[in-house]
Every structure is written in structure tokens, then in C-alpha cells.
Amino acid sequence: MTDKKADLAGPGIGSYDELKTLLPTDYEPLLSHRETMQALFAVKHYIEDNLGKELNLIMVRPPLIVDRDSGINDYLDRDGSRGPVEFYISNDHGQNPINAQVVQAATKWKRPALKQFDCKPGQGINTDMLAVRKDYFLDHDHSAYVDQWDWEKVITVHDRNLDFLIGTVEKIWKVIKGAEEFLLNEYPKLNTDKYPRLPDELTFLHAEEILDRFPDLPRKQRETAILQQFPAVFIIGIGWTLEDGYPHEMRAADYDDWWTETIEKNGKMMHGLNGDILVWNPVTKRRHELSSMGIRVTKETLVKQLEATNQMHFLKLPYHKMIMNDEIPLSIGGGIGQSRTYMYLLRKAHLGEVSTTVWPKILKDMCHERKIHVLE
């Protein structure tokens, strides 16, 4: 069994010896490379259009690079184990240089962007975000190349509650479920009894409730176990320290609110206004994360979360000052993995079948043996 502490940060399986035992041996792609691209762009437009309608979002252009000193880049795990790609722009013969970073996600950029695009309560933005995460272990569903629908929406103080979060997640699930039906109608080859359809509804569970069911299992194994009971779940409260002394997963302290008290069950107060959508992937026979999202921190919860993670020095950065000075709106937002979603909906065994990026030879050879042909 994986150690609980070792399971908190850093995605991916961890070794190619292990991956070799996990990749499917009975895989047959249902669509050719050409058909895959046609279906992919068709469902991309479907999802973007319908997310816009359900959440009242407009599409905007996100950055690919940001100023290192702005504090705007996504820190991902709070321990800093996954750092961004950095480079120096000499500019003006070194007189006005910039220390730049490639974004890891547009998570924090989006909140000040709401003000830039003059969004009012109930209005928001969506982005076709591309990023690089150089410290990922590259396996079947983790890549150094990341594409997401990174979205953000202005809310009021009265919206900062669990009911509002759940209502928003249900709208996103409606779009994902609708995308599946759209593809099955447009591409009949995807209809097969081998792979069941997504359930009509998500099951909502707090991370503490899942720990109660499986107290001895580390996070990924708990997720795998709960997905045997419920094939699509939204796990609430990711980042708060649970009963066993560990968070469900490490979560950055300066965007999602994982501190606020939300649920009391059996005399126990539970925390967090954020969570992840996970589904059971019948192709890979593994847990499959589609989205991470949450109601964002207030200046009060930002301070509490930075104190809890020994990161109070972040308050000196421009992004964090904007929150503390009430210069940017309250918001809810998240990221929906594009290639992750395409991989699931198009019944693929590997991210490399729906996105073109770099993979090590050992992985490409392993996939070729299993009839998994990644794009070059």
C-alpha cells in the first residue's frame, strides 16, 4: 500500500515498470487518428458553447507566459514540488528585463481578469488555456503539455456556500454528459457495450466521508475504491487536514477556499468550498480526474490558509495584495482538462491519442505493443 504522505502531491503512476502492468491489454481504438481529430474539435466547440450558456461565460485569451514576480502563476501543490519553466527576457539590452515563467495554469490570472473584462456578479470568462508542467511523471493520463478550459465567474458574498458550489458543479456535469450524448449521436462507432455511459448525476461526497469509509487507504486508493461504488463523484473539501492528519490532497493555499466550515455530520464539522470531479474510466480501468474547481479565498481565508501552510511571505506579491485590498472580485472558478475529457469521451487509452507532445521512447514502445498509437 502506498504511504499516505507520499500520495499527497505529484500526479502520475510513478514508474514505467508499474505502468506496464496497468495499461490495458485488450485495447482497440474505436476511431482513426483522422476521425479522432474531427470528433475532438466537434466536441470542443460543443463544450465551449454550452459552458458559456450554462455558466454565463465569454471566451477570452489567457497568457502563456507571466512575470515571475507577479505571484500570478499557479503554484499547484503547496509544497512547491512542481515548479514552472522560467526564462530571462533581456529586453532593451538588459535595461528593462523580465523574469518570465510559462504558466502552469491560469488559475490566479483569471480572478483579476474578471475585473479587466468588466464582469459583474453572475458573469464570467472561459479560456482555452495551454500550459507546461515540467515536473509531471509522464504516463497514460499525465503530460508535460496541459490544456484546460480554465473558467472563472464573479459571485457575491451570499454565493459563498456549499449549495452554490454544488449547483455550479451540476451545471458543468450537464455539459459533460451532454457532450457524451452528442458524440455518441455524431460518431456511432463510439457506441459499444464494452464501455458504459456516464451516469446522469454525480455523487457528492466530502473527502472526510470517503476517509471514514476507507480509513487505512491513501488518497488515490480511496478514490479508486469509492469509484467502484459510484462511477462519477465530486469530492468536496480538498486541502483541509482530515481526521487522519493529512489533507485528501495537497492544494495551493491562495486560490481555492478549503478552510471555510461547510458541513456538520455526526457531530463532525467538515471544511472546504472546493473539490474535484472524478470518474471511473472503463478503458484504462482506473480513476480519471476531469475537473478541479472551487469558490475562491476571501482576504480572511487567504491569510488563514497562508498561515497554515507557512507561506505568509506570499502577501508581498501583487496578486495577493489585490485580494487583501479588495481590488478584485469574489469568484468561483476551475479547470476542466481538455485532453482528459477528450480521452474519456472518445474512449482512448492514452492522452497521446488526443494531444501531440513529447513522450519518452520507453512509453511509446510500451504503448505500441498494446495497440495504443500516440501522436508524433
Image (tube, helix red, strand yellow):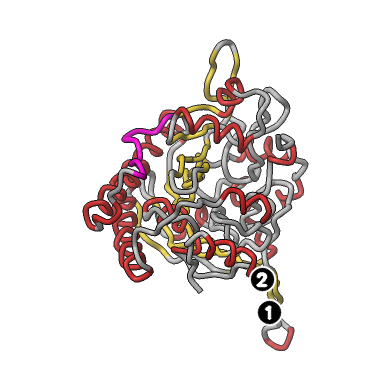
Residue stretch in magenta: 194-203
Q: Are marks 2 and 1 in contact (CB under 8 Å)?
A: yes
- Determine which of the numbered discs, if any, sits on residue 250 in the image: none
Q: Position of residue 321 (x, y in %)?
A: 64, 51
**Separation of marks 2 and 1 at Cα, in angstroms:** 7 Å
- Which residue is situated farthest in the bottom direction here? 93
Vertically, is 59 above or below 219?
below
Q: Would you call the spot at circle 1 few (<14 residues within 10 Å), some (14-19), or many (20 or more)? A: few
Rendered residue at 52%/43% (across/down):
286
In front here: 356 or 335? Answer: 356
Query: Residue 105: x, y in percent?
Result: 56, 58
The tag earlier along the polypeptide, 2 or 1, is 1
Residue drawn at x 43%, y 36% is 232
Q: Amino acid at mark 1?
A: Ile
Residue 127 shown left or right of residue 257 in the figure: left
Quadrant position of residue 186:
bottom left
Instruction: Look at the image and tell me in which quarter the N terminus lies.
Output: top right
Q: Which residue is mark 2?
A: 100
Element at badge 2? strand
Q: Quadrant of residue 209?
A: top right
Residue 134, image x, y percentages: 66, 63
Residue 200 counted in the magenta span: yes
Q: Residue at x 70, y 59 (%)?
A: 83
Query: What's the amino acid at mark 2?
Result: Ala
Circle 2: is it few (<14), some (14-19), or many (20+) Cα within 10 Å? Answer: some
Say whether residue 300 is visible: no
Res 89 label:
1
Q: Residue at x 73, y 52 (%)?
A: 80
Q: Evaluate whether residue 339 shows in this view.
A: yes
Secondary structure of residue under mark 1: strand
Main SS category, magenta section: loop
